[in-house]
């Protein structure tokens, strides 16, 4: 996976509370289109409709956008896509990157391949990584503002410590998918899916 050049300004707008709210997840799935991505969450074709960001029924609905070989699922909630069973289904036969932040400002990065966690970390302690190849993205983490040598006990608790914006940057650099306000506002295919 080659790192794509993306800068902080390309993704920082997404972290505005008026855009993603105070809990959200973005999941990038390789090699599937929007309809298949939504099906993997349990939607049928009859459930899929075009939604703008204004008319999308939240938090029940998720939207999807395809860019090159990746499709990103946009969820303004943190409940569905952090479920391991759903992540297994989403990454079945392919790879997926999931980033999320919950209402308590706890965030996480996970990279899965065919249901297996390959690399996973909490931005509060990027030195404590998990998965069967936890060091896979160390170079990309550094380039995105994380210090892979800092553990949770040693992490900086200042407001400017790396967090969700840096996760957005890391995911964009790994996938080449950069949401713009025009794309985000849609309309995009979406569906109401049960948690």
Image (tube, grey):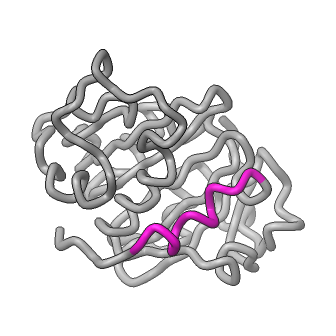
Q: Residue at x 42, y 49 (%)?
A: 98
In the depicted view, which residue is nearer to us: 41 or 130? 130
> Is 168 placed left or right of 17 in the picture?
left
Magenta segment boundaries in residue numbering: 7-17
What is the x, y in percent for residue 80? 59, 38
Among the 4 quarters of the image, the one containing residue 171: bottom left
Q: Quadrant of the C terminus?
A: top right
What is the x, y in percent for residue 42? 59, 49
Q: Is residue 14 magenta?
A: yes
Q: Quadrant of the N terminus?
A: bottom left
Residue 45 appears in the picture as rendered = yes
What is the x, y in percent for residue 36? 50, 66
Q: Residue at x 50, y 65 (%)?
A: 72
Q: Residue at x 43, y 74 (%)?
A: 177
Label tally: 0
Among the 4 quarters of the image, the one containing residue 12: bottom right
Q: Overall secondary structure of the magenta stretch?
A: helix
Residue extending farthest to the right is: 55
> Is 56 placed left or right of 143 in the picture?
right
Q: Is residue 189 magenta?
A: no
Above-or-below relation of 42 to 189: above
What is the x, y in percent for residue 181? 68, 77
């Amino acid at each position: 996976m080659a790192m794509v050049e993306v800068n902080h300004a390309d993704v920082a707008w997404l972290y505005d509370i008026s855009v993603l709210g105070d809990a959200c997840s973005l999941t990038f799935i390789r090699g599937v289109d929007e309809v298949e991505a939504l099906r993997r969450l349990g939607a049928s074709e009859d459930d899929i409709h075009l939604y703008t960001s204004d008319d999308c029924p939240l938090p029940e609905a998720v939207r999807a956008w395809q860019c090159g070989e990746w499709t990103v699922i946009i969820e303004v909630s943190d409940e569905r896509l952090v479920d391991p069973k759903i992540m297994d289904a989403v990454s079945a036969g392919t790879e997926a990157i999931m980033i999320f932040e919950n209402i308590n400002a706890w965030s996480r990065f996970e990279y899965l391949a065919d249901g297996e966690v390959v690399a996973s970390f909490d931005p509060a302690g990027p030195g404590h990584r998990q998965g069967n190849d936890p060091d896979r993205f160390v170079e990309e983490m550094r380039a995105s503002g994380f210090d892979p040598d800092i553990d949770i006990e040693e992490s900086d608790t200042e407001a400017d410590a790396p967090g969700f914006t840096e996760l957005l940057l890391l995911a964009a650099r790994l996938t080449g998918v950069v949401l713009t306000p025009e794309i985000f506002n849609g309309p995009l295919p979406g569906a109401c899916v049960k948690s």
